[in-house]
Image (spheres, rainbow, N blue to C red):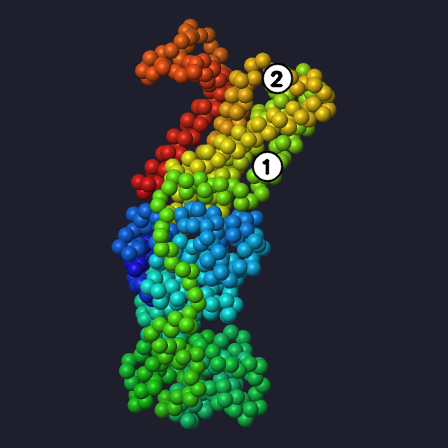
Amino acid sequence: MIQAIGLTSNPRKELPPAVDDVSFEARPGRVTALLGVPGAGKTTTLRLMLELQRGRGITYFRGRPLHRIAHPSREVGVLLSEVPGHPARTIRGQLGMVCAAVGVPIRRVDEVIEVVGLVSLRDERLGTLSRGMDRRLGLACALLSDPHTLVLDDPAGGLSVTEGRWLHGILRAHAAHGGTVLFSTDDPKEAARTADRVITLEGGRLVADQEAADFARTRLRARVAVRSPHAARLGDLLAKEARAAQRSVEVVREDGNRLSVYGSTCADIGETAFRHGILVHRLADETGDMGPHATLPAEGLTSATVFTSALLTSASATSTPTDDPSTDDAPAIDEPAIAVAATGAHTPDEPGPATEARTRPAALPGARDLPQLPPPIAVRQAPSPLRPLRYELRRATGVGTGYLTAIAVLVTSALLSVLLARIGHTPQPRLLAAWPRECPLPPAALGAGLLGALAFGEEFRHPALATDRGTVPRRLGLLAAKLLVASVTALALAVLTVGCDLEMLYLVYGRELVGVPADWLSLSASWIGLTVGCAWAGVLAAGIFRSTTAGLAAVLAVPVVVVPLVQKALAGPSVRKAAGFSERLRELLLMQWPFGGARYIAAGARLVAQPVGGALMLSLTALLCAYLLTTLRRRVR
């Protein structure tokens, strides 16, 4: 069950809030529609419910607000706009990544793909999907964790009639199994045809909360759409004949040469046009929307106005009693250019779509008439620290960005090392790292920083975790997984870069430049620390500033901005030295360093004391503190 109480968005500059004090309920076992024209506040209402947008009010999902639910994706399946996935990722890869995030077995992917009809497209990339296939994939993501509640924003928008009917069948099947379904739409006929209850918004406020049968009776009416070059003359004739026959007929002058006729049939209008020699281009039964403020008139009364051919004008209205109960359902119309002949006892013999909507049975259709849902998840996986790691691995390996970046780094490093060796005057350590003095960082460090920035930058650009509390969940488990994967990637990139440079130098210049330096251990530690540190800086900065570009800019700021500051700070005279640091650290921790650990501690301290190492450590400390502060701030909010 969904209980939304007092949902109000934050006010905008000199404008009222998009949503103002909206409260409603959506009960389990029923389909609830949130209806409104574009701009009425439907999407904002859903985002406030899911805590994706700041505002006031609270929403309870089976008695608990979303931020109090340990695993929100298991309680609420969400489809907002298009599927937030990388265009180069495949359907199976996207669902597998979401499976790892929500903690369901990977076999669930095949079950959901079969239900939504994407078996033949499982290896297609998201960027190539049509609107209908994208909607199917979004529904698959929503059903993946077997949630009790489905919240969907305009799920049938842009779909064909067949695809829309199938999607509504899935929603009905979910409700038939005891689930709660809430979806938004701007089509009143779709709401009356699909939902059990319709909630109407207008201008950010709730204006109606009705059962589907009451909604169809007050909002929808059968009408005949007419298009003729002589629409004004035909409207006059229809009103005149209705008055003569004492029938209740309304003629509404639409834009151009169109008429909407209420209370008549295609046959009657066609005969009238034929008798008077009026050319008709279109004549069809439709269902008309009377607007969100349509209400039932007083019992036994109908309104009548006289049609005039002038556009957007109306004559005086009269009210006459009638004994015909069939006219009780006619709503009072407040529209310009409406014609109603004198009321009578005649009603159309052919029911239109609105009549069918009114008589739709309230009982749920039989199980055989509903699409099949994925099998329920009987056993849930226990919380595991490996879940975010599995998610990050599938995210990083699901697209070719990482592989292309690594190839570009290796090729650039090999070419730079050959060029630097040809020019000469370059020390061997810089030659093996392909690090010219004019560049702030070597290609391997830049590549590691870029891959680290992409780790969080793609989360904000393609938020696959939007259904799991917020745009991107700022959880330490997810951060640790990203830092670990970034570290392994940077380490592999550092080793491969040195290996490729050595091999390239050997092929071009022979054994002269491929000797092992005497201090290879400290150089290796410095090289690995530089690449891993750049990768971490990219991860943390992209997580703080929510941008891949900001993450890469933070990596470049370390040698360009922070290193000169550190060098300036260390350039002054030093009165004391930190000799014996490792021994004093051992005394403080009351432990003995195994296997000559004091030597390694001293080497690590010397690395940090270097300008680049100190600047990188200082930057990482500042970024980590900023990330933790933003995480705590979000949790407090």
- Out of 361 and 104, give the one closest to the viewer: 104
Q: Residues within 10 Å of mark 1 (few under 14, many from 20)?
A: some
Residue 377, image x, y percentages: 38, 55
Residue 576, image x, y percentages: 41, 7
- Say what secondary structure mark 1 lies in: helix
What number is the disc on residue 405?
1
Say above or below: 310 vs 59: below
Residue 106, image x, y percentages: 46, 50
Q: Amino acid at mark 2?
A: Val
Quarter in which the N terminus is drawn: bottom left
- Out of 318 and 220, give the one closest to the viewer: 220
Query: Residue tagged by mark 2?
Result: 516
Badge 2 vs badge 1, beta-carbon distance below 8 Å: no
Q: Residues within 10 Å of mark 2 (few under 14, many from 20)?
A: few
Q: Quadrant of residue 189?
A: bottom left
Q: In the shown orientation, is residue 379 left or right of residue 232?
A: left
Q: Amino acid at mark 1?
A: Thr
Q: For marks 2 and 1, give the one nearer the viewer.
A: 2
Q: Residue at x 32, y 65 (%)?
A: 29
Q: Residue at x 32, y 53 (%)?
A: 8
Say above or below: 432 vs 60: above
Q: Residue at x 60, y 15 (%)?
A: 517
Is residue 138 visible in the rendered structure shown here?
A: no
Residue 156, image x, y percentages: 47, 64
